[in-house]
Amino acid sequence: MLAAIHIEYIVGSLLFLLYGITIVGLVLVIIAENRNPLKTIPWVIVLLLAPGVGLLFYFFFGQDNRKQRIISRRTYKRIMKMSQQRRLPQDSCAVPEPYKPLSRLLSNSNRSSLLYGTRITVYTNGADKFKDLLEEIQRARHHIHIQYYIFCDDEIGNQVKHLLIEKAKEGVQVRVLYDDVGCWNVKDRFFKEMKEAGIEVHAFLRVAFPGLTSKVNYRNHRKIVVIDGKVGFMGGMNLADRYAKGSSWGVWRDTHFKFEGKGVHGLQSVFLIDWYVVSKKLLNEKIYYPAAAIYGDNIMQIATSGPVGQWRTLLQATIFMIANAKKYIYIQTPYFLPTEGLNQALQTAALGGIDVRLMLPKHSDTRTVNMASHSFIDEMVKAGVHVYFYQPGFLHAKLVVCDDALVSIGSANMDFRSFEHNFEINAFVYQKAFALRMKQIFLHDMRYCERLVPSRWLKRPRKQRLAESFMRLFSPLL
């Protein structure tokens, strides 16, 4: 019996030693990654003081994937090459002088080329967007590429599904890409029905339990549709009835866009890169990039970001827009959990006399995120940022418009998740006419907003402020 106890003691000691070595080794790895000290120190403290819970949280949420690649440089260049062909001479496609550094930033960090003369249709409600989407799918003759974070098994989801099946039977190439976590609530038969009809369907970064994986924290939040390489859709709307019919507590206000012209080539290259990641099939034939007509004089750059790669392109570009605004910068976002750099940029702009307006939903679909967002608003109003709460329902639009000259539109929210964890896509449009158009949409939405009164806001109950501050601690995870 004593021998058994002795063996058990030795085994226990060895396991404890191994566990301790693992934790210390992990701490050294985190330190060696040269992260922002504000992020490194909390992880080190958690791992040392609560190693069990800390190890689990680090596995899911703490790993730094910046140096990883999900696609080889050679394959990436081959796909991007097609979208960059047949460009106009530089003197015919020149970015306005104040924004040349931004254009170079997007080019250097993201290989984002200048796309000239795209026609942009704006949708501020789901009914109009889905109507046009179904009509464009019906017109498809060669291929349909469709990618959404969420496909809902509801009325609009099934309308799109059945139409895609119909087009596949006609001989049209149909490829569907969805996010595995975003579609967790969708039963397998929804996608199986499409596969059985000959549609190529893939989930992005599939998460299988009980095989635990940190992939659950890295999601593809992009919304892209490309039809015959001639028409494309992108923006904030997923495939779900709520975007057209609203929710039980109000309208679902969102913004989406249709591209015709060269901008579609930018969307195509992003889709085909994601498609290669999940299918390992390289599609870069000229048929996917037909000659594009010129519809106007706007200039566009389409940029992406994600948890892999060296640069946080969309975060850097957004901070650039804020830091270089001369008159105003208007922002719509459903979630406001800014990184420290973004937080400082907004405060600095407002303190410098720039008209900074931030529009958020009065009520959110996620209570914890809403609470955390409110903790950041204190600093905003003290710096002079004008905050507006959209009242009719949930504001899900993503928009940054600056100085009647520059607009950022797409899928990225103003939060840690979009800028650091998700795969996102935004378009940066350099044109006064389009900027004024998006500015008017913002001003129209202001009519349905409650403007935050700083004196009242800063006097809200101490208990409420404490709860909001507590939730702020989890901002990078929300």
Image (cartoon, grey):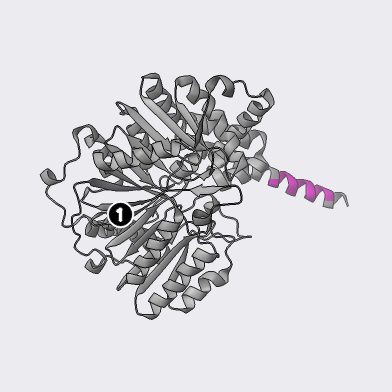
* Picture coordinates of residue 402, whole percent (x, y): 32, 34
**Residue at horizontal 20 percent and vertical 40 percent from the top:** 95
Instruction: Please name the residue that numbered disc 1 is placed on.
Output: 73
Q: Amino acid at mark 1?
A: Arg
Circle 1 crowding by C-alpha within 10 Å: few under 14, some 14–19, many from 20 = few
Q: Is residue 64 left or right of residue 113?
A: right
**What is the magenta range?**
5-15
Q: Tell me if residue 23 can be seen.
A: yes
* Picture coordinates of residue 475, whole percent (x, y): 55, 37
* Picture coordinates of residue 60, whole percent (x, y): 57, 48
Q: Main secondary structure of the magenta part?
A: helix
Of residues 96 and 139, the one nearer the viewer is 139
Residue 58 magenta: no
Vertical position of residue 88 compared to residue 106: above or below: below
**Residue at horizontal 32 percent and vertical 40 percent from the top:** 407
> Which image quadrant is residue 90 in?
top left
**Residue at horizontal 24 percent and vertical 57 percent from the top:** 261
Q: Is residue 135 left or right of residue 468?
A: left
> Which image quadrant is residue 197 in?
bottom left
The quadrant of the rendering that contains the C terminus is top right
* Picture coordinates of residue 321, whole percent (x, y): 33, 33
Of residues 38 and 290, the one nearer the viewer is 290
Q: Is residue 461 left or right of residue 88?
A: right
Residue 6 magenta: yes
Instruction: Name the secondary structure under disc 1.
Output: helix
Of residues 134 and 326, the one nearer the viewer is 134
Q: Tell me if residue 473 can be seen.
A: no
Of residues 16 and 414, the one nearer the viewer is 414
Vertical position of residue 82 compared to residue 297: above or below: below
